[in-house]
Amino acid sequence: MADKYEDIIICRCEEVTLGEIREWIAKGYDTFDELKRVLRVGMGPCQGRGCRDIILREISKMTGKKYAEIPPGTFRPPAKPVKLGAIAKAGENE
Amino acid sequence: MTWKNTTDAVIIGGGIQGCSIAYHLAKFGMKDVVVIEKNTVCSGSTGRCGAGIRAQWGTEMNCRFGLASLEKFEQLHEELGMDCGLHQGGYLMVAYKESEFEQLKKNIALQNSLGIKSRVVTYDEAKEICPGLSADDAVGFTYHDRDGHADPFLTTFAYQEAAKRLGVTFYKFTECTDIKVENGKVKGVSTSRGDIDAPIVVNAAGGYAQQVAKMAGVNIPNFSERHEIIITEPVEKGVCPPMLMSFSGNYYIQQRPHGSIIGGCSPEGHPEDYTCGNSWQFLNMMSKTITKLLPRTKGIRVVRQWSGLYNMTPDRQPILCEADEVRGFYLSVGYSGHGFMFGPISGELLAQKILGQEPRISIEPLHYKRFERGELIIEPAVV
């Protein structure tokens, strides 16, 4: 499977390459959440906004499953990163 | 993956317990082991935990388990061939009440008697261990430098990959729906994907341990409660080198080697709760706790919050045994929030027991019959 695209960084927050993603899909980690847990893809500040679609397509290509049938993985709050100080202070006004 | 209709042992649950038990069974010579997991490996309590590893405990049993597990973690990378993200920055225990500090000092005496080199430290020492710490209201601190944390995902996957190399089969998205029992002996399991016959079945179902036990007709007094947790963006090292933990302060806070800060606490009133939702109340309270203890964290952003289940027993000690009523049915459950850190040792000990060997640390006191007999081993050192 080695080709010139292996070194492309897919998850920019955690610096994970296409080669690493392909290696773990081949080991059976063929859902987004499994790849997230083993490689940290989607765990950085952008929470997968940049890499999720590319990874889901890669899973589709390697497993033969339709893109639409692959679960997108869990989305967790907060929707955007928020400073600890701002959250702590917000409670004081209630 | 082909379906196995028969096997030597079926393990229910792909968390740290299930993966460690499977690995140790195969390592000790069992030929055919199957792990069934209703979601994917490490998707339940293990993957949601606070990642801590400690030997600073208040009962002899937990001190022995904690130290033995710590020793296994220290050589796990070599044994399993995969980095498990071990960070030994110590646990810094913070007491805010005199009675609590007295208990911590008693724990230290017990730990020292068992070879754990924990000690009482002054506030000045605490600030050297954790620069930037603000705990003027604390009355005392204890510290053990070999404690720390590891990556729960990588540790569990390392066990899974090592077990696979030894021939263990993992079926994901495979839920246990029934356990077959005849004449007081276990015969196998029914799952959402078919039946598997086996003379040995292990319940390592984490938050759902009591439901799985009931499938075999075994009643255990466990219940599960939801604990919430947050993680920040990665920042430079040294913001929180040790695991900061307080029982009366109700918190644990640590910084992973990767740079993210993780913080969690216990839910008020400890209600039984199987939903893994997230609350604003927790996010707000935890942010207050972290910024009060470590004021320089105010500008660090929270990227994610989630929750997971603690599988609780009446004395907050695990159940690790064979069922009296159903021979061949084993349980490794009820870790009450400490299953990840004990996983390496409890998996080894239960595998020894299953294979008819003498576990190198006795697990006799961890039979669930202790609850009926009133022989509880109450652990004072739990958040």
Image (cartoon, rainbow, N blue to C red):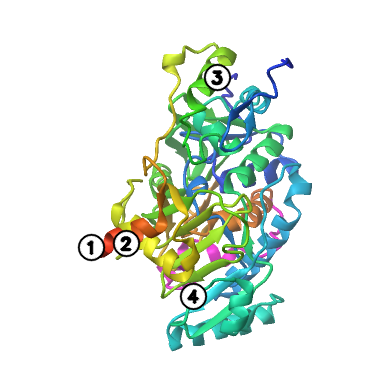
CA distance separating discs 4 and 2: 18 Å
Residue occupied by mark 4: B134
Residue occupied by mark 1: A93
Within the image, what quadrant is residue B54 found in? Answer: bottom right
CA distance separating discs 2 and 3: 42 Å
Label 3: state its secondary structure. helix
Residue occupied by mark 2: A89
Q: Residue at x 66, y 42 (%)?
A: B159
Along the line of sight, which residue is nearer the eye, B321 or B266?
A: B266
Give the magenta-colored segment's residue range: B356-383
Contact check, label 2 and label 1, Cβ < 8 Å: yes
Q: Residue at x 56, y 75 (%)?
A: B59
Residue occupied by mark 3: A59
Point out the frontmost of discs 2 and 3. Answer: 2
Residues marked 2 and 3, same chain: yes
- Counting labels gives 4
Q: Position of residue B247 (x, y in %)?
A: 45, 73
Left or right: where does residue B255 sit relative to residue B45? right
Amino acid at circle 4: Ser
Quarter that holds the C terminus of chain B: bottom left
**Above or below, comparing residue B375 to residue A43 in the picture:** below
